[in-house]
Amino acid sequence: MAMCAALRCVSANFSAALPLLTRPAPIWTCQNSLRPNILRTLYTSSRLSGALKFTDKHEWVRVEGTVGTVGISNFAQEALGDVVYCGLPEVGTKLEQMEEFGALESVKAASELYSPLTGEVTEININLTDNPGLVNKACYEDGWLIKMTIEKPAELDELMDEAAYEKFIKSLDS
Amino acid sequence: MVLRLSNRACVLSGSARLKSTLSTYFDEMGKAGIILKSASTGIFENLALEDWIPDRVDLQNRSMLLLWRNSPVVVIGRHQNPWQECNLPLMRRLGIPLARRRSGGGTVFHDFGNINMTFFTSKKKYDRHRNLKVVTSALKALRPDLDVAATDRFDILLNGHYKISGTAAKLGRTSAYHHCTLLCSVDRSILSSVLKSNTSEVIKSNATPSVPSPVKNLLDVDPTLDSNTIMDAIASQYSNEFGFDSPVITVDPTHEGLMPGIHKMAQDLQTWEWIYGRTPKFSVCSSIVVDDVTIKLDMDIKNGAVGQCAMEIPENWLPSEMVNEFTSTLNGSNYCPNETAVLMAAFMRTVSMTADVAEKIHRLCAGVVSVM
């Protein structure tokens, strides 16, 4: 989802640099110490291994086999404020990459959600019905939004990996 | 494109070159801030204009303020439950329509005494406090003694207590809008009666609830404050606050040539699926009394349609097979009194029953429809 960078300036909490990822990123830290050919293998297999890929609208997708789990990043949930309602699509909905698939309502606004990939919704996180705050508390784990099929795996290559996404959000400050 | 310019206001007429749309006109103007007034008082046309602008106008380097008013209508927020928020049977009797907007927030009543303001910006420039400052400063410029102030919930309070404005917003891909109401001379007796649900006790839902507040009109504290004066003051203050040299343009949001695609946007906002069908899943648990018999009614409503319907009816009043047939007829139907009445009429024609049973079914149906 798209965020207002100006919100960062207004919110005092943001002035410290990096937003914290709530789950450890072992693959990222390992990459730095590996030799190039192993690195190459890692990059191709990361598509299947469950590494997070990010959009510039601050959504993430984690691929496990043929299914992608989608959520919003820590940067996004902080900018959004307390989520009070998750408006998610029906299972079976077909989505194009960048297509609006729902909205999260928070004290800030109703913020539209945009699909990171082309595919079909296979599952929605029903825990969010009674506990929309999971999106804030555990945005990379229990606060996932939807699961979907991956019709065009090449779209994953266009997304940012964690390191690139970190760089991207740092650049938003300027 | 033919323009009539008078007193920094101009009206775009229909004799535009087909290639020119409102968007290209703004680009050609090259202004960083533009003020629009809608020529329509139709809620769906005006909500469609709010959809059209962020979709088709470049808001990265340009901000806009839209001023609009509507004929009487109740507007619910994107994730709300109309059965919980307003009195639908009363609205039908009074001919007051229901609309669902795309922004979040709570339920409001509009009539000509209410001014709506929509502040369109890029996402970077989204700043609700600053927008509300435009409104409170404008009012204070008109009447320096007026006690109006914005709260941290983005309401505006009069005399520290009465709500005169509520806010809602929508963040899109690259742009955002913040809109708010302003009570100038709204019919408060209609407002309070339509915004009081007749069925909220029987509904269990996790839809976003409204926060009811005591309200007042600006006219109540100063009978010389009329909507037009206030709109002019707000337009002027908008330019001051943001350092714009904004012209004020009146647009007709029904003009498809000027705003291609806007007609479909207005149509989409009027479908049953959007207005009622978008209601988050909820359940109805009600006791209705028919002929001194208490009937317990349980329904699950998903996407505005009856998913599961169960009734507890004494066996000696109506046989259970009849009750089962009745409830299975309701399953899958829209939670709508007209549709239900039609279904029930068909049910009574096709299922054989004695006159006595028919009479009971008829009254049972009336009871069921009364919660819709």
Image (spheres, grey):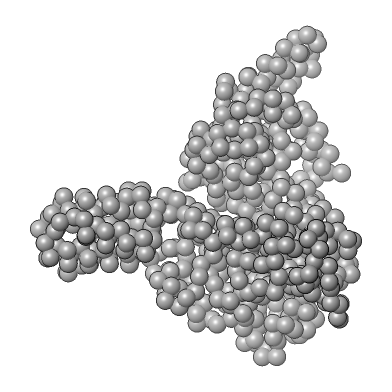
Task: Point out the image quarter for the C terminus of chain A.
Answer: top right
Left or right: B85 in relation to A163? left
Judge from the rendering whether residue B218 lies leftward or rightward of residue B106; answer left or right. right
Q: Residue furthest bottom?
A: B223
Q: Position of residue A39 (x, y in %)?
A: 76, 13
Horizontally, residue B51 falls left or right of residue B138, namely left
| Residue B108 against residue A87 in the figure, above or below | below
Q: Position of residue B245 (x, y in %)?
A: 89, 69
Query: In this rendering, does residue B206 appear at all?
Result: no
* Nearer to the camera, B11 or A67: B11
* Left or right, A114 with reference to B309: right
Which residue lies at the image location 62% right of the left edge and 57% below the top edge? B264
> Which quadrant would the N terminus of chain A be assigned to in this image?
top right
Name the spot of residue B38 as percent of width and height, x first. Answer: 70, 72
Where is residue B296 shown, x and y percent of the image? 24, 58
Q: Residue at x 75, y 9 (%)?
A: A38
Occupied quadrant, residue A33: top right
Above or below, B179 against B328 in this view is below
As drawn, A59 above or below B5? above
Residue B29 in sight here: yes
